[in-house]
Amino acid sequence: MLEIEKTQGLGMTSLRTRQRLVERLTEKGIKDVRILEAMRDTPRHLFLDEALSSRAYEDLALPIGYQQTISQPYIVAKMTEILIEDKKLEVQPIEKALEIGTGCGYQAAILSKFSKTVHTLERIKALHDKAVINLKNLKIRNVKLIFDDGSEFQGRSDKYDAILFAAAPLEVPSYFLDKLSMGGRLIAPVGGKDRQNLTLIQKIGKDKYETKILDQVLFVPLLEGKIE
Ligand code: SAH
């Protein structure tokens, strides 16, 4: 981290600001030390336009262009914490993760710390391209960025032990459930554009799933089609 601080010329102020974000996340109920460290060590300011980078460590969703946002740190921390909560003792608890809605790549960067492999899909080419650069600059190599429509992701046979929606579907398409490996977890904001239920679905047996509603959240909607 210090290396990144130096190259960005941000010095100690930024370290203090990041520490404050960690305090804020702790107050809001994030407990997993692995998550708090990942949130502290990931330079969120590098995912934002320079004009907004001074606000990067506030616990806010912020615009990234194309009417999309970088998710609020608390939500990123919470969703990731839930995906790894039953694997407390493992350093890299997720074998293969899938994210729908890369945006600028921040959530994918956090997921990459806990996963051997991450696949992430984005339907807007310009954001996909931006995220490719962001992750390359951070030397993150275990994330495969795919320019594609997540709602059309039926064809592939990969199984995932963690699936995260960063955009809200009205319902979770059933073929995503088929993509979960045994014990695998899917987390998604489910509902219309005004408010959604943060929903956790776990595969507990052959064709058997357990669903829990965790919270009320507000994400951008999952939309169909690609934008070149
Ligand atoms: N993961 C981001 C949040 C991005 S916002 C972060 O780390 O902050 C959600 C993103 O989902 C937007 O970039 C939007 O373009 C994308 N999205 C919406 N519908 C999609 C779809 N069907 N397939 C892929 N990406 C989609």
Image (tube, grey):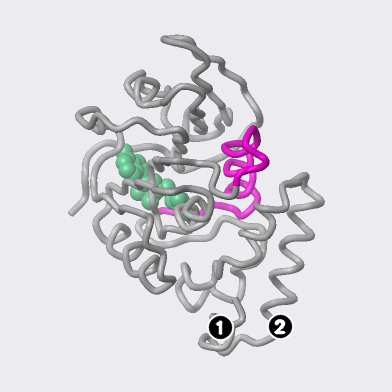
Whether residue 75 is situated above or below residue 4 in the rendered picture: above
Whether residue 29 is situated above or below residue 22 in the rendered picture: above
Nearest-to-viewer mark from 2 and 1: 1
Q: Nearer the viewer, residue 116 or 163?
A: 116
Answer with left or right where residue 153 lies relative to residue 2. left
Q: Which mark is residue 13?
A: 2
Answer with left or right where residue 146 lies relative to residue 64. left
**How far across and how far down the image is residue 1, in percent?**
59, 75
**How far across and how far down the image is residue 149, in percent?**
26, 40
| Number of marks | 2
Whether residue 225 is situated above or below residue 9 in the rendered picture: above
**How far across and how far down the image is residue 181, in percent?**
42, 25
- The three-letter amino acid code for the residue at tag 2 is Thr
Give yes or no for residue 79 being in the magenta stretch. Answer: yes
Q: Which mark is residue 30?
A: none
Within 10 Å of disc 1 (Cα), the crowding (few <14, some 14-19, many 20+) is few
Q: Quadrant of residue 65?
A: bottom left
What residue is rendered at 59% in x and 53% in y?
72
What residue is rendered at 58% in x and 28% in y?
197
Q: Nearer the viewer, residue 38 or 72?
A: 38
Q: Quadrant of residue 85?
A: top right
What residue is rendered at 24% in x and 28% in y?
154
- The three-letter amino acid code for the residue at tag 1 is Glu
Q: Which residue is label 1 attached to?
A: 3
Answer with left or right where residue 130 lies relative to residue 152. right
In magenta, the rendered stretch is: 68-90
